[in-house]
Image (tube, rainbow, N blue to C red):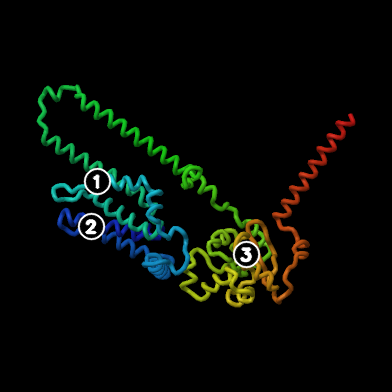
Amino acid sequence: MFVFVWTYSLFPMLFIAAFIWTLIVAWNERRFEWRPVAYTFGGMVLGNVINPYFPQNIWLFVEHFLEKFKVGDFAVAVGGEWYPYSGVELLLNFPVAFTAMLIGYILFAPRSGKLPEKSTFLLMFVTVLLVSQFRSKRFAEYFPPFAILFAAISWRDFLISNIQSQGDSEIRTEAQIDSNKKSKSQKTYEIIKEIGVWTLGVILVLWMFYNIAGINLTRWFNFKEDGLISNIQSNEPNDKYRRAMTWANENIPEGERIFNCNWDDFPKLFFLDTKHNYVYGLDPNYLYTKNPEIYKLIGEITSGKVEDPAPVIREKFGANFVMSDAKENEDFIKNCLESGWCEMVYEDDEARILKIRDQKGEPPNDEDETNAPETTEENKQSDEEENQASQANINQTTEDKNEEN
């Protein structure tokens, strides 16, 4: 548990699992099995206290817990994994897991007044995971494997109890024991059983390919489900903002603060450029908890509601440079440039970097944009066009010589 606390933020799940196991043992054996709860609780406490971030890690955990698990919507927009699934999304995304849970519920049954320990533990734990997904998608990584384990253990317990009950009731003669012949009904049952196993296997294989490739039935029905391949392909490239941050490293003085318009850009910016610091990142709740007014001000600035944002950015955030995604914050960038306080110092197809002037100047006009120096992307495109033109001239010269000969 000590290592689990250091490596995973949802470490209380292990304590919940230990508590469930203690309840099951208490029901079956009428005694309090204190060791699972005591050991996990002790490891949880020691992992938080003997910690390089103590005591800040305690306040961070409390803040996360209160914000992420409170009833109602979030005060601050957070990452998509913290929002819940709808009922339809759960059914479409986890049909195998739901089928496994249904099988587990049907086959689960106490025996002689006692609970089958492993299947009971999985029943309770999987039910907690299922309910948790109506609050957050974060638990989706646990639900499917534990649901399948629940079905498998319940099925095993059911078969074992059946075999035992049949063994107690059957009185077989020596002739029956020595006989290898099967009745017609037994042969039919074996065939149906084998067909069922193969059918289930084929369905699961097809479902695996469906999850990987997805399906598009919009031509006939209003249904489309993206697969794993298309989801991965639609991700942002790993080197996004690399050109912009290379320019920032080379041209912005070390230690300067950059006003990043979007908090979720921070991981890439910090990975590519550690010479500068940024306004907020990782989780907007950090800034909101520290200063709610500043957090709200960022939203007003980046949405274009502040007509003259540059002086506010310098005064409130201490930043002389602004970084924005090339396809976002259009109104904000327009306000910055038209105010005369900002100039575009870098631009490509991924990012834009603005510098806040010391004094207000004239806004850029069409002629300035025409005479502006080419960006790296524009230089690359110009080189490609020149190479194509040069190759075309070479081909034309060759054709002319061939015609002369």
Q: Secondary structure at mark 3?
A: helix
Asked if residue 131 lies left or right of residue 236, the reply is left
**Residue 170 on image: x %, y %:** 11, 32
Q: Which residue is label 2 attached to?
A: 22
What residue is drawn where x is 82% and y is 41%?
A: 393
Q: Residue at x 51, y 43 (%)?
A: 219
Residue 291 visible to the viewer: no
Q: Which quarter of the picture shows residue 267?
A: bottom right
Structural distance between the alpha carbons of marks 2 and 3: 57 Å
- The answer to which of 282 and 95 lies nearer the viewer is 95
Q: CA distance from mark 2 to mark 1?
A: 24 Å
Marks 1 and 3 sit apart, C-alpha to C-alpha, by: 56 Å
As shown in the figure, which amino acid type bears the numbered disc 2?
Answer: Thr
Kindly check if marks 2 and 1 are in contact, taking CB atoms under 8 A apart as contact. Answer: no
The residue that mark 1 highlights is 106
- Which disc, if any, is residue 160? none
Q: Is residue 7 above or below residue 333?
A: above
Q: Residues within 10 Å of mark 3 (few under 14, many from 20)?
A: some
**Residues packed near mark 1 inside 10 Å, few (<14), some (14 to 19) or many (20 plus):** few
Pick the quarter of the image with the C terminus: top right
The residue that mark 3 highlights is 330
Residue at 29% from the left image edge and 43% from the top image edge: 152
Amino acid identity at mark 1: Ile
- Indicate the amino acid at tag 3: Glu
